[in-house]
């Protein structure tokens, strides 16, 4: 198969979809790999690293999209990239379609087959291609949140760990999955007083068993959220209902009850965000204020640590990328129901129920798509 990997063009996105190690594995399996020249530089990989791995460098995204049977990326295709997708072409990347009707329409219109990293599943009820970036974003959240808490950045002027004689910051993490757990670990490591809310009792039991002495946890109700939020210096939004738009857990009205200069870090922004006042921001201009409350809502947080993230993502996607290349997408998805769960669009049809429900669009089952 011809596998193409363009340079990412989302603002301040320095990751790349294939590492030289992944390129080498694909070449060793008999595939042709095409990388856009300079595409790996932001993650510290030179063109020479890719050519040494057996890949061919192409100068432009147009050549990559025209040449490849499968496009491997990081972020959802941007409008210009969507125009280059064609019928029968396979796209393997993050999509986050539920809050994005324009992209969904373009993918459907293109006739391509699009497999979304974020909806591929595993045997433990996890999302193995979201997990590595959730680990990164979770660990970054207290880091960017603590910067935002500084007075000069609009925050309350509270130090995460406090000092002897002064209480530490109170951090509320809503959602105790991968993002939430990693955020809580780091925030607690910085000395903050951390509470995690989740709706899953199984998850709360796990958090209590493993992190009982490190941070607190509580069942997530509207009442508990309101009470803890009013007392928090920083609130990290980390909920997920796979594939669906994030539930809004703090309303604009509620901002009045928060502390002035409190910081909201909405990691769930790529699914539309879990605070009513969240709107996606970029690394260039990440922070804004609403009613005296600071918001950080960067939809591609892992791009800030592009090297760590590219390697972590490449490790996770490589076996799936190889299966798709070796077998073709249909056979690979027939052999692995978890990969089939990643199918969001095929041949002009939406194939992911939660996206269809979020956008009010017709959809077919992924099993039905295998027959088209
Ligand atoms: N902004 C960014 O750069 C990035 C964003 N993300 C996003 O972060 C979000 C979280 O991802 P993961 O932690 O991997 O998901 P996850 O599935 O591991 O965890 C989500 C948790 O939310 C809980 N939850 C659902 N509804 C809830 C509610 N009403 N109250 C409290 N908890 C609730 C679930 O029980 C689950 O434990 C996703 O939207 C993901 O796409 C992930 C990586 C990077
Ligand atoms: C998960 C995701 O969207 C990201 O890493 O950018
Ligand atoms: Mg994202």
Image (tube, helix red, strand yellow):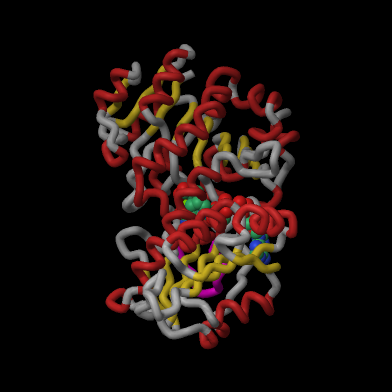
Q: Nearer the viewer, residue 38 or 49?
A: 49
Extent of the magenta region: 272-280
Q: Say above or below: 62 vs 217.
A: above
Asked if the stretch drawn in magenta spans residue 55, the answer is: no
Image position, residue 250 (x, y; %): 58, 75
Image position, residue 194 (x, y; %): 53, 68
The quadrant of the picture occupied by the C terminus is top right
Q: Say above or below: 95 vs 63.
A: below
Q: Say above or below: 282 vs 345.
A: below
Image position, residue 337 (x, y; %): 71, 32
Q: Nearer the viewer, residue 166 or 137?
A: 166
Residue extending farthest to the bottom is 256
Q: Residue at x 55, y 73 (%)?
A: 276
Q: Nearer the viewer, residue 357 or 234?
A: 234
Q: Residue at x 32, y 52 (%)?
A: 12
The reply to whether residue 97 is visible in this rendering is no
Relative placement, left or right, of 353 versus 280 is: right
Magenta highlight: main SS: loop
Image position, residue 36 (x, y; %): 31, 31
Residue extending farthest to the front is 164
Relative placement, left or right, of 344 versus 58 is: right
Q: Residue at x 42, y 47 (%)?
A: 78
The reply to whether residue 1 is visible in this rendering is yes
Relative placement, left or right, of 324 versus 19 is: right
Figure label count: 0
Q: Nearer the viewer, residue 174 or 274?
A: 174
Which quadrant would residue 114 be assigned to in this image? top right
Relative placement, left or right, of 119 versus 78 is: right
Asked if the stretch drawn in magenta spans residue 277, the answer is: yes
Which quadrant would residue 24 be assigned to in this image? top left
Q: Residue at x 45, y 74 (%)?
A: 169
């Amino acid at each position: 198969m011809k596998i193409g990997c363009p340079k990412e063009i989302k603002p301040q996105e320095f990751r790349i979809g294939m590492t030289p190690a992944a390129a080498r594995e694909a070449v060793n399996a008999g595939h042709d790999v095409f990388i856009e020249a300079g595409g790996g530089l932001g993650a510290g990989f030179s063109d020479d690293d890719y050519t040494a791995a057996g890949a061919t460098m192409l100068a432009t995204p147009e050549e990559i999209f025209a040449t490849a049977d499968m496009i491997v990326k990081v972020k959802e295709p941007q409008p210009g990239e969507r125009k280059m997708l064609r019928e029968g072409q396979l796209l393997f990347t993050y999509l986050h379609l539920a809050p994005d009707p324009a992209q969904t329409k373009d993918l459907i219109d293109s006739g391509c087959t699009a497999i979304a990293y974020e909806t591929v599943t595993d045997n433990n009820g996890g999302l193995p291609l979201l997990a590595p970036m959730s680990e990164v974003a979770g660990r970054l959240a207290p880091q960017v949140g603590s910067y935002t808490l500084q007075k000069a950045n609009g925050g309350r002027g509270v130090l995460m760990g406090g000092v002897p004689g002064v209480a530490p910051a109170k951090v509320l993490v809503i959602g105790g999955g991968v993002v939430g757990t990693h955020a809580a670990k780091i925030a607690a490591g910085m000395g903050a007083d951390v509470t995690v809310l989740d709706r899953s009792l199984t998850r709360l039991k796990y958090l209590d068993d493993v992190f009982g002495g490190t941070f607190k946890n509580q069942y997530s109700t509207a009442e508990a959220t309101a009470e803890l939020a009013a007392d928090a210096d920083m609130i990290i939004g980390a909920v997920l209902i796979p594939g669906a738009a994030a539930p809004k857990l703090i309303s604009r009205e509620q901002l009045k009850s928060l502390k002035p200069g409190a910081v909201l870090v909405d990691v769930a922004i790529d699914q539309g965000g879990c605070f009513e006042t969240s709107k996606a921001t970029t690394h260039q201009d990440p922070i804004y204020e609403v009613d005296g409350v600071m918001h950080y809502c960067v939809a591609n947080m892992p791009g800030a640590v592009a090297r760590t993230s590219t390697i972590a993502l490449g490790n996770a996607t490589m076996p799936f990328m190889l299966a798709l290349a070796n077998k073709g997408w249909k056979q690979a998805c027939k052999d692995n129901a978890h990969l089939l769960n990643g199918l969001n669009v095929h041949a002009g049809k939406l194939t992911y129920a939660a996206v269809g429900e979020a956008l009010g669009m017709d959809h077919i089952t992924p099993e039905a798509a295998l027959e088209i």
